[in-house]
Image (cartoon, helix red, strand yellow):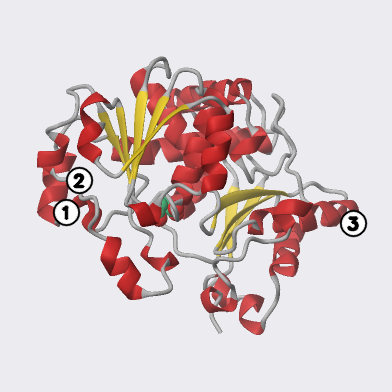
Amino acid sequence: MTPENSHDLRLPNRFLELYTPEKIHGDFVGKHIISVEQFESNDLKILFDATASIRKRLKQSDRGLLELCAGKIAVTLFYEASTRTDMSFQAAMRRLGGEIVAASNGVQFSSVYKGENLADTVRAAGCYADAIILRHPDVGSSYEAAYYLDKLREQIQRKPVIISGGDGVGEHPTQALLDMFTIFDFKKGFDDLTITLVGDLKNGRTVHSLSKLLARYGARDVTLCLVSPAKLKMPEKILAELKAANMRIVETEDLSEVIGSTDVIYWTRVQEERFADPAEYAAVKDSFIMLPSVLAQAKPDAILMHPLPRKNEMGTPADHDLLDADPRSVYFQQMENGMFVRMALLAKVLGGLWV
Ligand code: ASP
């Protein structure tokens, strides 16, 4: 049994209805981070100020950063593949003087292999750690983890937190935070921005979280263009939220209609692992390919983002090299921002000293 085939990837978890994540309201200490719905604009401002300060201090090799999570331990529980989220959380914790622990041979060789359920594995981690970084294939799994950790809190009189590193096709809140920081950093705000999300808007959790966060933060200022094949459109539930926030939305299958007026291009991978039928994946996988000739149609001051990893949606490795050399491509800076934002978040949530 592997964790992947022991879960129905499509079934939303009942804890999505049962558990309401606590709003941040300016105070991050001890809060689970499981949805962008917890954040208001003031929370983003606090987090982004902290992120900018951490970035500066890190570049100055300020050893004081090592105090911020000294004595704290985070556990990583990754039931799905990860490179950036896993490594950036590990690096973030260590750069703040904290420790990070993982099941020695990966979570699939922990008691998960013996059939232990998420509720119990998460509580085991909570017994040892102050923070648990969870990535799991089920939508709402982080809500389930938070629900059971709250029960554990009463028993152990300590407050371990869950931080979602992505739950199936649901949300990826910390990715959205780093994406927002990157946009803010390059564009110095959101006034009058046109942001275009391209690719698998149905299964991509990063675009779900980012668009929801944009609706909460910049709804009045941003025009959001959603470009996807008809079969990979943004889910209706999220579209309804965006419209309720009075966001200007343009939905199209034709990138050329919007690329020339776009300030932020957010390119995404077709999420192969979410397709039950390989033929369905094959039919859509090449719908949008970012190539130098496509980027040539963008504004000179546009930025090109991508949550990564990339496959054929950015052409061949030779195309990658050409795209990477274009100063508008900021996905490596975006990636580095992931560590800065996660450092700020860990320092805030774990209640480290703050200056
Ligand atoms: N790394 C991102 C995620 O975990 C994007 C992707 O996998 O396409 O959702």
Front-lying residue, 340 or 82? 82
Mark 1 CB lies closer than 8 A to ligand 1: no
Residue position marked by numbered label 3 in the rendering: 155
| Residue, disc 1 | 315
Q: Residue 35: x and y, percent?
A: 62, 43
* Closer to viewer: mark 1 or mark 3: 1
Question: How far, Cα to Cα, is label 1 from label 3?
Answer: 53 Å
Q: Cβ–Cβ below 8 Å for labels 1 and 3?
A: no
Q: Earlier in the sequence, mark 2 or mark 1?
A: 2
Image quarter in which the C terminus is found? top right
Q: Residues within 10 Å of mark 3 (few under 14, many from 20)?
A: few
Pointer 1: residues within 10 angstroms few (<14), some, or many (20+)?
some
Image position, residue 324 (x, y; %): 18, 41
Q: Which residue is mark 2?
A: 290
Query: Is residue 146 something one can see in this rendering?
Result: no
Q: Secondary structure at mark 2?
A: loop
Front residue of 223/55: it is 223
Q: How far across and how far down the image is residue 5, in percent?
A: 53, 78
Say whether residue 291 is left or right of residue 73: left
Indicate the secondary structure of the residue bearing disc 1.
loop
Q: Camera-side residue: 87 or 47?
A: 47
SS at badge 3? helix
- Disc 2 residue type? Met
Earlier residue among tags 1 and 3: 3
Q: Are marks 2 and 1 in contact (CB under 8 Å)?
A: yes
Find residue 117 and report its horizontal and vertical position in percent.
Answer: 70, 73
The residue type indicated by label 1 comes to Gly
Q: Quadrant of the N terminus?
A: bottom right
Q: Is residue 124 left or right of residue 276?
A: right
Image quadrant in which you'd find residue 246: top right
